[in-house]
Amino acid sequence: MNIILILIDTMRYDYIGANGNDWIETPNLDRLAAQSWCFDRAFSASFPTIPYRTDVMTGKYGNPFHVWKPLPFDTRSLPSALGEAGYATQLIHDTPHLVNGGHAFDYPFHTWTFIRGAEVDRAWMDDEAQWPSNWCKDPLFDALGEDADLTKHNLTYARTNRGRENLDDWNCAGLFNTAAKFLNDNKRRDNFFLWIDCFDPHEPWDVPPEFMLKYDKTPGYDGRLDPRAFQGSRSNPNLPDEAKARLKASYAAKVTWMDHCFGRFLEAFDASGLAKNTAILVAGDHGTNVGERGKFGKGAPVHEQEIHIPLFIKTPEGDTGRSSAIFQPQDFYATITNLASASMPDGLDSHDILAAARENSAGNRELALAGTARGWSDRNGYFTVFDQNGYLEWRPKPEDCLLTPYGTLDNTAADHPDHVKSLHTAGLAELERRNADPILIDWLKNGAEGNVPENCALFDGWPGPEGFRTYFARAYDGP
């Protein structure tokens, strides 16, 4: 059996028609979902991009969550396990972080292809960066200032996308067009593992004008975008409501643009004849805020908007349905190796989510945990506990925790004190079960007074190469 894993960066569960959204166009994801098992309780764990993919690659949790560092060369990664089982493995990606800056996520694959053009990709330099044709200054964003985010970040992105005019010039189109070519070149195989890593709808929410006009019908608006609104300044409280509405429209437009590009891949898949012997798994890596709590983008503590992700699994057998079994990204390892009849290393906390769905069972997890390795020392969110009904923003004292039902922004902790205490206790026990440092667990149990203990390992990390800095931290030092 061939296996295709498609990870979609910054894809919210609730922005897909198949998951109940009634105003965003996702016809191609919806078509795949109709042929798949659909999972309603899939959650990220380590957060965001590189930590999440580390979870997928290794089938392991950080202590409590993976930090953003390169993939170690000595890990028995998911592609490595499949390679040992006779699979030919290919990575096709437009997510720059996987390879830029020495992150080494190409290393486990037999072959890999990088599609240029996404955020923080530095593909070109020139004397003067020229804006793509769909950019222009917009008075709606004048509150951000004349030069907001234009000195290096967006100019690097503009240089990388110099000469972009046609739809096929955009990185997302290039990604799925390349994946479609892979299918045509390998349609007689029955032993490939293809990992497609799609950076859209990640920021910047930069889309072709015709897709923007699907969601912003302001009279006189032509669909062009102001690059000042692409980055962190989007949450500026001085932005007018009209600007915030345009930001929300731009994320929706990028979801639909990604879906459009994904549709080309689905068409090629249907034409290839591979459906008879190929499984497709599609998931988001995390979501984002689109105006919730006054925020645009991701942060900590993590909420449903950032952590609840879509997951669809289509198999050659053609069985379909919906499952509420709780899934975390470590479960890709068991699910995919079982599909491949490959062996999984001992000691992984990874469970076959497809088997749970087919058995109509609740699966092996009662809770999901999510969070970031950053922020513990300044109390910017410890971790979040997700169950079937909602989520608890964990704090050392139960009375400080927030309890939120899914689909709302309401804090209902005061109405359900017993449930808060139960989730608080269960969340800490689950953190301990996942091999968090005992020093950290004791510190949390004793009220987390003072700073995180210096001799405590916050995450299952490893020393980065000497001088290593995350790619995005140094991405704009150059010309």
Image (spheres, rainbow, N blue to C red):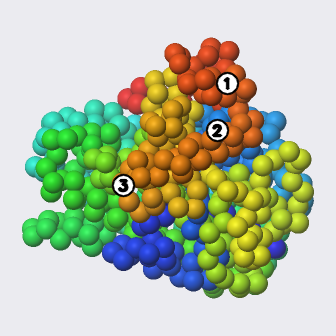
Identify residue type, mark 2: Leu
Report the label total. Answer: 3
Residue 353 point in image, percent of width and height: 72, 65
Which comes sooner in the sequence, label 3 or label 1?
Answer: 3
Q: CA distance from mark 3 to mark 2?
A: 24 Å
Q: Which residue is mark 1?
A: 442
Name which residue lies at 46% across and 61% down.
Answer: 406
90 vs 53, nearest the viewer:
53
Secondary structure beneath label 2? helix
**Horizontal side of residue 450 vs 167, given as left or right:** right
Depicted 74 relative to depicted 356: above or below? above
Quadrant of the rendered image containing residue 149: top left
Name which residue lies at 81% across and 68% down.
Answer: 339
Which comes sooner in the sequence, label 3 or label 2?
Answer: 3
Q: Quadrant of the C terminus?
A: top left
Callout 1: 10 Å neighbours few (<14), some, many (20+)? Answer: few
Secondary structure beneath label 3? loop
**Horizontal side of residue 137 vs 168, given as left or right:** left
**Horizontal side of residue 134 vs 310, given as left or right:** left
Q: Which residue is mark 2?
A: 428
Callouts 1 and 2 close, C-beta under 8 Å? no
**Horizontal side of residue 103 vs 303, given as left or right:** right
Depicted 270 relative to depicted 11: above or below? below
Quadrant of the rendered image containing residue 62: top right
Q: Which residue is mark 3?
A: 409
Residue 104 point in image, percent of width and height: 68, 39
Q: In this rendering, does residue 93 appear at all?
A: no
Q: CA distance from mark 1 to mark 2?
A: 10 Å
Name which residue lies at 34% across and 59% down.
Answer: 251
